[in-house]
Amino acid sequence: MADFDLHILGCGSALPTMRHLATSQIVNLRDKLYMIDCGEGTQVQMRRARIKFSRLNHIFISHLHGDHCFGLPGLISTLGMLGRRGPLFIHGPKEVEDYLRPVLNRFCAGLAFEVVFNSVDTRKHAPVMEDRSLKVWSIPLKHRIPTCGFLFEEKTEADHLIREMADFYQIPVSLRRAIKQGDDYVTPEGELIPHARLTRPSKPPKRYAYCSDTAFAPEIAPIIKGVDLLYHEATFIEADIARARQTAHSTAAQAALIARQADVKRLVIGHFSARYEDDDVLRREACGIFPGTILAREGLALQV
Amino acid sequence: MADFDLHILGCGSALPTMRHLATSQIVNLRDKLYMIDCGEGTQVQMRRARIKFSRLNHIFISHLHGDHCFGLPGLISTLGMLGRRGPLFIHGPKEVEDYLRPVLNRFCAGLAFEVVFNSVDTRKHAPVMEDRSLKVWSIPLKHRIPTCGFLFEEKTEADHLIREMADFYQIPVSLRRAIKQGDDYVTPEGELIPHARLTRPSKPPKRYAYCSDTAFAPEIAPIIKGVDLLYHEATFIEADIARARQTAHSTAAQAALIARQADVKRLVIGHFSARYEDDDVLRREACGIFPGTILAREGLALQV
């Protein structure tokens, strides 16, 4: 796969079926893994997808419904048995820690690594986590309990220094890093060579947005504007919109409207209700509004 | 299948793999279902085995290690969504309630059925539960935390009244039930017709014993003496006996020794360590001591 991929481990809704499992995804950015939600069965799905447990350091939990977090105790136990030492970071509403801490105290008392909780304010669009490769932001969503989505933003690489220019001006090695990052160059004779003449821009950073679970929330469009890939829940079809409203979920048409309004590059829909024998009804409905909508399925991998 | 079956939903040990899932089994006695242990993924395995959620009323938990109970929150949530109304009984060490009650309070506040906990003293061989079809006993096991196995004993049906005898003596309908259950019959003339002349014994009751997790515990042999089917854990082979001792588990040879000593009719082994690429090493080792030993696998159904 490419530098920045999404792996769908589960894309069903609350009631698991033989077609779909509870929600979980892996974002793989240059072999660093970030998990989003962790429903029951996630660890077995990771094995099926041949995803390396040791490369996972951050888990993002959207909300505290069982189909998004009941896989955490088993996954954390397994990480312990596999000999993990480094800390594991769990980002999510503060209730995640309230639920998980007593369970870990009971079952994982001898864990050789630390589980660090980072409490996320689900009402705000704010930075959640940042490392050398990536910045993650919360996306406030509308569900029955505090819930947020997550926006994964690849960090801009420094511009590339054009070798011929570096040679021509005999730019000292000690200055090259700063020039890549935006400095101009002043020659020993005092001539200023602007940054833009010396460098080529790196490829634009990619962005992935995860929005589940949520009622129709067009107010998120500015936050996810133009992302390369949007995963949006589409639990129901428009014929069942009363049920969608009642349970604070979206229809496939609503997911597609959000995608169109935010002018995203690609849309993948998931969190399908168990009531639909054939998910293609959801895809067709979304495609009427956002052509090319992709249906999530367990095992699907997409380039961001 | 027959009147009294065992369905293996998961028979791996703590580390789930692509070959084996965490422990769970269903005992089906004339379409009444009894679950033993409930590891992560059990509810999906039930769907795969086409087992009816509505027929399940009793769950027996052997001990509070995650690979035997992490499937409970998801299963109970699902039963709620499927519209269950009747109580669900959970039998196991008292720690099961300590773990599960707060989780249910958090995730299943609106549950339309009651979850009733029955605390089992794992140090004793004693009755755990009884209904019209079945009596279940605890089997004290030797593990790192309080643990017991379970003995499922089909209830003896009443003897069959021989129609020709009933007609010959013109036995009143009102007395027939008592005669089937052991009474003699006294004719209006005062003649005593003994029970044994009037009836044919029903078929002998079947018994199934579940023993996992446990170190080698030959003291359980009298309890499981002559059972029709024994499931015994066999986490390791003899070459890894040091690891078996350290973790309070059994080897395949030890499981077979117990089976031979208790003179059981059939032995099925499970709870296999993830370290063995081919479980057949475990089967071969057990068969050297107890010929015909069966390897458990996900999806296996056995008549008791």
Image (spheres, coloured by chain):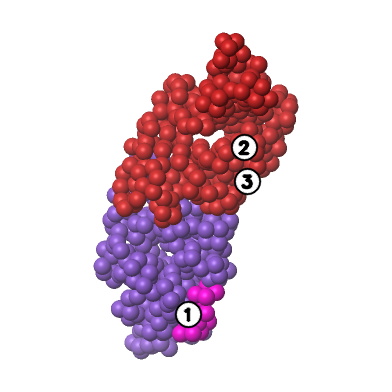
Chain colours: A red, B purple
Q: Which residue is located at x 29 percent, y 61 percent? A: B145
Between label 3 and label 2, give the one nearer the viewer: 2
Marks 3 and 2, the one that precedes in the sequence: 2
- Amino acid residing under circle 2: Asp
Q: Which residue is mark 2?
A: A3
**Same chain shared by disc 1 and disc 2:** no
Q: Which residue is mark 3?
A: A299
Residue A247 at least partly seen: no
User: Can you tell which quarter of the image residue B198 is in?
Assistant: bottom left
- Mark 2: few, some, or many residues within 10 Å (few <14, many ≥20)? few
Question: Which structural element holds mark 1?
Answer: helix
Mark 1 falls within which chain? B
User: Is residue A210 shown in magenta?
Assistant: no
Residue B2 at least partly seen: yes
Question: Which structural element holds mark 3?
Answer: loop
**How far across and down, in percent of the image, does residue A203 sit?**
64, 26
Question: Which structural element holds mark 2?
Answer: loop
**How far across and down, in percent of the image, does residue B195 sit?**
39, 85
**How far across and down, in percent of the image, does residue A140 sit?**
48, 23
Separation of disc 1 and disc 2 at Cα? 49 Å
Q: Which residue is located at x 45 percent, y 62 percent? A: B13
- Amino acid residing under circle 1: Ala
Q: Which residue is located at x 56 percent, y 15 percent? A: A188
Q: Which residue is mark 1?
A: B286
Q: Which residues are magenta?
A: B280-295
